[in-house]
């Protein structure tokens, strides 16, 4: 497959928005994108680029640490999906709820969590964000209303629904963001939650991170329809598609969705079209994907898009970019050092934090 299949299959959606080669050119921005750019400004866009770069680098370092056997168990990387997480989570408030799957490193970093305790969690250390008991799939932060990191496909969806119910019950204008994959969309958990969210008018924002595969199974082979927003119809819910490789689009969509739901609670289904640059998990060589397909998405690399935009706007020159990136890489290296030097949990405390 030479081109991203989304571009070919369906009218009205182009993974590159017609700009080609993944370059976001200010002159070629839509009016909406220009407005978003103005709203974010230099500082806002720089901060988002910093977070995206942090995620990419954190994932590269965790991949390396895994190969050095410093990390065991599962490891699902977020590379390729950075614009989605950073764009959407940069548009919510500090009291909103967020829950996601095992592919949770990017979401945690996008929420502003420090890389040190996250890396330490991957290393199974006592200083980890879940005290080394959870590992890669179970990041969690009470301070950020981040309800995890979940290993059961679709298991996070009813949890996010419960948070949406809490939000509605307390009537304090919070929303609940529920991230899950194209594979998880086919689970009963989603369909039961969608029905209740609609019936009870809960402020649940269901976000499908459609990266086109659930392990080795393509969405063409797992979904009855290819426009995944159609799944909202049976639940009398709004459904909307967004280019998940485009930071500005993800931000704008979520900003509006959240603002209107704070006033008038009701659910929403978002299909964000994206791509994972690596295999499903660290042990997956992803031989089920054609090289041309992977390359066609690499040309849409969200980091390159945002860095290109910053440069074209005159907001970041080569030298400043190098400095910013070096600073982030140093921070991630410090996180690895912190994880390395931290103690393992004391075996005597094995029963602590266990719910029984
Ligand atoms: C209930 C359940 N069934 C199967 C699995 C094994 N499994 C782990 S991830 C995965 C694929 C899910 O794909 P998707 O929802 O698209 O998310 P992605 O990994 O692409 O982010 C499967 C089948 C599981 N963890 N839980
Ligand atoms: Mg998937």
Image (cartoon, helix red, strand yellow):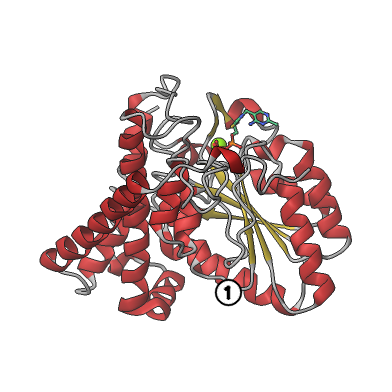
Can residue 132 be spotted in the picture? yes
Where residue 53 appears, as percent x and y from the top left, is 31, 56
Where residue 96 appears, as percent x and y from the top left, is 64, 69
201 w.r.t. 282: above or below: below
Q: Quadrant of the C terminus?
A: top right
218 on left or right of 312: right
Where residue 119 appears, as percent x and y from the top left, is 40, 48
Furthest toward the top, the residue is 287
- Taking the spot 64% from the left edge, 76% from the top edge, the residue there is 259
- Taking the spot 59% from the left edge, 47% from the top edge, the residue there is 149
- Taking the spot 77% from the left edge, 49% from the top edge, the residue there is 158
Q: Residues within 10 Å of mark 1 (few under 14, many from 20)?
A: some
- Taking the spot 84% from the left edge, 51% from the top edge, the residue there is 195
225 w.r.t. 330: above or below: above
Where residue 24 appears, as percent x and y from the top left, is 31, 60
Which residue does the numbered mark 1 point to in the structure image? 93
């Amino acid at each position: 497959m030479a081109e991203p299949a989304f571009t070919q299959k369906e009218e009205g959606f182009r993974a590159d928005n017609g700009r080609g080669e993944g370059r976001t050119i200010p002159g070629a921005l839509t009016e909406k994108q220009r407005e978003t750019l103005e709203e974010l400004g230099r500082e806002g866009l720089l901060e988002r680029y910093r977070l995206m770069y942090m995620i990419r680098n954190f994932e590269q370092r965790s991949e390396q640490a895994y190969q050095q056997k410093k990390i065991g168990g599962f490891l699902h990387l977020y590379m390729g999906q950075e614009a989605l997480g950073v764009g959407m989570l940069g548009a919510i408030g500090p009291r909103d709820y967020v829950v996601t799957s095992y592919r949770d490193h990017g979401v945690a970093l996008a929420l502003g969590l420090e890389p040190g305790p996250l890396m330490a969690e991957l290393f199974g250390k006592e200083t980890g964000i879940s005290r080394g008991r959870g590992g890669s799939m179970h990041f969690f932060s009470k301070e950020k209303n981040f309800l995890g990191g979940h290993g059961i496909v679709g298991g996070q969806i009813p949890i996010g629904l419960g948070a949406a119910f809490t939000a509605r019950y307390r009537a304090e204008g919070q929303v609940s963001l529920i991230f899950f994959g194209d594979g998880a969309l086919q689970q009963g958990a989603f369909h039961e939650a969608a029905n209740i969210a609609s019936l009870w008018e809960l402020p649940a924002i269901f976000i499908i991170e459609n990266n086109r595969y659930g392990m080795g199974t393509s969405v063409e082979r797992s979904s009855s329809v290819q426009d995944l927003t159609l799944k909202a119809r049976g639940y009398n819910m709004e459904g909307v598609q967004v280019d998940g490789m485009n930071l500005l689009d993800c931000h704008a969509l979520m900003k509006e969705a959240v603002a209107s739901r704070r006033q008038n609670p009701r659910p929403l289904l978002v299909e964000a079209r994206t791509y994972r640059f690596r295999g499903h998990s660290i042990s997956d060589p992803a031989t089920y994907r054609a090289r041309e397909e992977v390359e066609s998405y690499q040309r849409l690399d969200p980091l390159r898009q945002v860095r290109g935009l910053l440069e074209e706007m005159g907001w970041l020159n080569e030298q400043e970019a190098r400095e910013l990136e070096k600073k982030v890489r140093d921070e991630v290296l410090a996180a690895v050092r912190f994880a390395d030097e931290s103690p393992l949990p004391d075996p005597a405390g094995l029963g602590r934090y266990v719910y029984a």
